[in-house]
Amino acid sequence: NSLTADVSYVGNHGQHEFDLFDQNQPTPGAAGAAAENLRRPFASTYPWFSSIQVWQGFQFSNYNGLQATLTQRVTHGLNFTAGYTYSHAQEVGSADVNPVIPMNSLNPIAEYGNAGQDVRHRFTIQGRWALPGKKVPGQLLEGWQITAASQVWSAFPYNPVDGTNDVSGTGQLQDRWDLAGKASDFNGYGGRIAVPCYGAPGSTFAAAAGCTTGLPQACITAASSLPTNPNLPAGTAGATGLAQLNRYGCYMSGNSVIVPPAQGTFGTMGRNIFRGQGFNTVDISLMKGWLFKERYLAQF
């Protein structure tokens, strides 16, 4: 008669949510402002414009969750509330502060994936226990209580993008690379734990601090199988996946690798397919109270 359990399904769907996309995005190809501006859809009509960003309600989102709560009312000085949520949130795009241009504004719905705030498992508990007292001088064994609160969250997703090299040649600098293997092999990174990186001698990654010089065979195999862009001008750097790999490098964890796509193509990695690190916190307090003449309470 003092313990209750509530279990609920909670779901919602959002439609016509607003975000930005670039209606003047150039078709993929060679990098560089001069070359990209010639490939923009409105290059002949508005040659003085580069990006033309449009604010439009093209996004949608959904959430499905199992939410359970266990409540213990005061019994023998103990009461607590525990909650558990198992859920999945998905959407076309998300940003904590500012809107983010899609990787490919010509196909923004391809950004649909795990929401940035998608926490699959979340457990919380908070409670108070008034310890049984015993009459002794100075009330030293009376008036003690412990309160505690704890939260445990599973890992947030993360979305690695190449904001430097413009491998798609669209100028958006939101390019994702290609994953060969399992996304779960790259879970758990973040904070001070960097994803292992490798570069060919003389490449960008070989010169980067913390990266290993020398390409694993798994990276070479994955890059060799990537499609090329047949419309690239002759002599374009990184025209094949293998050439691009030698320019920049790759990431490897477990048996899986992340390699750059050939210049002028999009990588196939979905948005937010990796999981970083979880979060947990515990807060505990110990309190002692002294009662004076049944009207006043001093608490430390």
Image: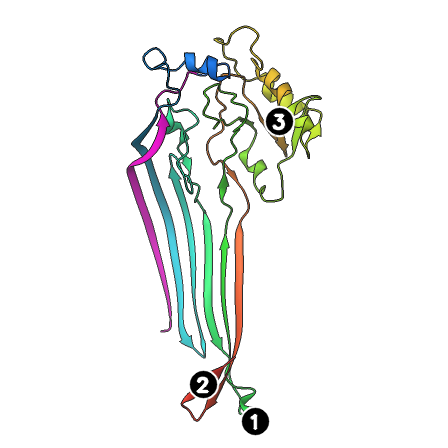
**Which sits in the foreground, 32 or 2?**
32
For residue 38, above or below residue 166:
above
Callout 2 secondary element: strand
Question: In the image, is 92 to the left or to the right of 210?
Answer: left
The front one of 45 and 8 is 45
Are circles 1 and 3 on residues that touch, CB within 8 Å?
A: no
What range is drawn magenta here?
A: 1-27
Q: Who comes first in sequence, dot 1 or dot 2?
A: 1
Give the quadrant of residue 198.
top right
Determine if the magenta segment contains residue 6: yes
Q: Is residue 267 left or right of residue 250?
A: left
Q: Earlier in the sequence, mark 1 or mark 3?
A: 1
**Residue under pointer 1:** 137
Q: Which marked residue is nearer to the observer: mark 2 or mark 3?
A: 2
Tell me where residue 247 appears, x and y as whole percent.
62, 19
Which amino acid, mark 3?
Cys
